[in-house]
Amino acid sequence: MKIELLYFTGCPTYQEVEALIEDVLRSLGTPAEVESREVKEAEEAARLRFLGSPTIRVDGEDIDPVARSNTDYGLKCRVYRNGNRFAGVPPRELLERAIKEARNGQDCCAPHR
């Protein structure tokens, strides 16, 4: 499993999100390659389909199913819905669900021995 954290320098929440990713992986007992990647230019943001900082992808899929069809790429802060409010850090449950879905997808498709 590969988890990508895309951010831009100056993002006030990306380090908190890095810690969240590590904590969720540890609590779920799920091994993963975690790659943090700084996005520096608007052209790069468009090429990477960067929806704002922080963006988290699990095996190439945004953790927020609602955002997967968005195309408003750019160097900006990103917020996540958490109940009736918005925050710069996604709800833990959103990340957990994305990791579990990716893990289950791997299990279903792995060759049986």
Image (cartoon, helix red, strand yellow):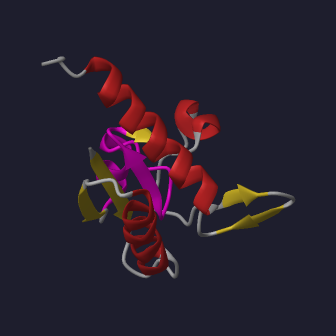
Whole-percent x, y for residue 47 in the image: 30, 41
The image position of residue 35, as x and y in percent, is: 24, 60
Find residue 2 and report its horizontal and vertical position in percent: 26, 47
Residue 52 magenta-drawn?
yes
Magenta stretch bounds:
41-60
Residue 74 placement (x, y as % from top left): 46, 54
Q: Name the side, left or right, on which 29 lies relative to 34.
A: right
Residue closer to the observer: 104 or 4: 104
Tell me the quarter of the image containing the N terminus. Answer: top left
Which quadrant of the view contains residue 83? bottom right
Taking the image as shown, residue 3 lies to the left or right of residue 50, namely: left
Q: Which of the image's four quarters has the C terminus? A: top left
Residue at the spot x=46%, y=56% of the render?
55
At a point 73% along the width and 56% down the height, the residue shown is: 81
- Position of 54 with respect to 18 (left or right) is right
Task: Name the residue located 36 percent from the left edge and 60 percent from the top edge.
Answer: 5
Q: Which residue ends up furthest to the right in the rendered image?
A: 84
Total count of labels? 0
Task: Report the front residue among 24 and 39.
Answer: 24
The residue located at (27%, 65%) in the rendering is 36
Choose between 27 and 47: the one closer to the eye: 27
